[in-house]
Image (cartoon, coloured by chain):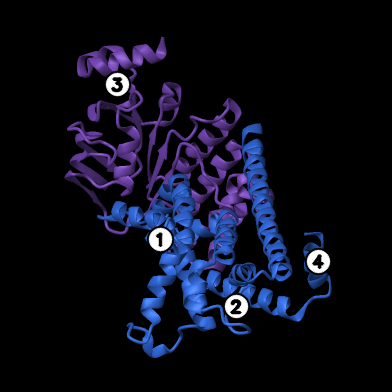
Chain colours: A blue, B purple
Amino acid sequence: MEKIAGTAWQLLITLDPQLLSIVARSLSVSALACLLGCAAGLVGGSYLGVARFTGRGAVLTVLHALLAVPSVVVGLLVYLLLSRSGPLGAWGWLFSFQAMVLAQAVLVFPVAAALSRQVVDDAEVLHGEQLRSWGAGTAMRALLLAWDARLALLMVVITAFGRAISEVGAVMIVGGNIDGFTRVMTTAIALETSKGDLPLAIGLGLVLLAVVLVLNALVALLARWSAWDSRAARGMAGAL
Amino acid sequence: MELLSVNAASVRLSAQTGAQLALSQVSLRINAGERIALVGANGSGKSTLLRLINGLLLPVQGQVRAQTGISQAMLFQRPHMLRLSVLRHVALGLWLRGTTWTAARAQALQALQRVGLADLAERAARTLSVGQQQRVAMAQALALQPALLLLDEPTASLDPHAKREVEALMEDFARSHPQAAMVFASHNLGQVKRLAQRVVYLEGGRVLADLPVADFFNPAVLQSRSPSAHLFTQGELA
């Protein structure tokens, strides 16, 4: 075991090209997916946070249900969409970088939408009437309140990125885990472990752990910053 | 000149599921230059009536008719500041009503000078004291140059000093805008006596008295016109 750990460590400190390319691909797929999924999720979630319409409850129920959908199911749906006989088969994206981005974006969307909906809904309770009395319509309120709650929304983005980078099922199905092409950290770990090549799997696992740790540290930092900001505001407001 | 009228309006809040209405068959005329106080116990419908007048709530029956082009501004019981500087917070309201951002900032600064907070224009609005925040909200309302100013218990969460400051601003508004009307909800009968010309008493979502301030504070007149309003004032004044 010590020998395996030593080899894994060696791969990390010598910046092994294979390991680096997998890490870089993994980060770029998840970053791009997060960008797309969060862009749609934050816009949709913010709008749902302020809009009141018939059927809103049903939409929210579906959105919350989507949070619990396993990544392999998302992978399967995107696979069906992109397969040769699927509606998007003509794009020729199956087993490509784009397919992995699409699958992770679909996975990230409900996370970003549901969490941002809650954040903006809370802000609407506080500021909604005031903004409405100033003449702000639904879209403008969604925009202003999302901006007002930007710290909390940044936490949502980081959480969404964490969901994307750590999933394995969707990218495995739509990417195919092709060496040098669609192999990312999670799929490589799964493959190398099954092959018995533990040093690379452990090395990638350590990188993945480090990424997740950094993300969580960022969320904690933002949460503390946000709480401090609110406390400071309340403290000053209460002090008179 | 009539600025706005509420005609037999009833309001049901979305949280209410039963038959009870937050406002029931309420009628009210608001004329230019009037200072009207809405009084009544908690849950009597004062805030709901102000929200109805401001268009934040829609009646399930009856109607609200406002003079065309009339501008309104509303102050809430507890000001909630956005994560903006004081100046931007005030300017935002103007911008949302169609003023260009540059002009909105200039007008906002003038309004802040009027309420004595120009020095704090660049401070984060949320870090101000509650009293200062209410003055910022007042500056925001004044900047809109409303023909109808609505205030929902504007001094309820303030200490006596901050209360006096906001009352002074209300008096200043009434003096400097003789054609504008001001409608405020209050539990403070002393404040009502000082600031209002007319008092509307609400109970259970209904208007039970609508009297000139002198008549409202004349026990004999009030008892003959509205015994429950009389009881309310006795309870409040005891």
The residue under label 2 is A183
For the C terminus of chain B, the quadrant is: top left
x, y percent for residue A108: 49, 65
Task: Check disc 4: other Cα within 10 Å, few if <14, some if 14-19, many if 20+.
Answer: some
Of label 1 and label 4, which has the lower sequence position?
Answer: 4
Badge 1 amino acid = Tyr
For the residues carrying marks 1 and 4, which lies nearer the camera in this image?
4
Q: Secondary structure at mark 4?
A: helix
The residue drawn where x is 52% and y is 44% is B80
Q: Are marks 4 and 2 in contact (CB under 8 Å)?
A: no
Q: How many marks?
A: 4
Q: Quadrant of residue B222?
A: top left
Question: In the image, what residue type sits under mark 3?
Answer: Asp
Q: Give the chain letter at badge 2.
A: A
Between circles 4 and 3, the one closer to the viewer is 4
Which residue is disc 4 drawn over? A9
Local packing at callout 2 (Cα closer than 10 Å; few below 14, some 14-19, many 20+) is many
Mark toward the start of the polypeptide (4 vs 2): 4
- For mark 1, what is the residue? A47
Q: Which residue is mark 3?
A: B215
Q: Is A209 on the left or on the right of B64, as rendered?
A: right
Relative image position of residue A57 (x, y in whole percent): 30, 51
Label 4 marks a residue whose chain is A
Residue sitting at 51 percent across and 76 percent down? Answer: A100
The residue sitting at 39% across, 35% down in the picture is B184
| Amino acid type shown at disc 2 | Arg
Q: Nearer the viewer, residue A79 or A131?
A: A79
**Both labels 1 and 3 in a single chain:** no
Q: Which residue occupies the foreground of this view, B226 or A78? A: A78
Where on the picture, by quarter, is residue B161?
top right
Chain for numbered disc 3: B
Q: Secondary structure at mark 3?
A: helix
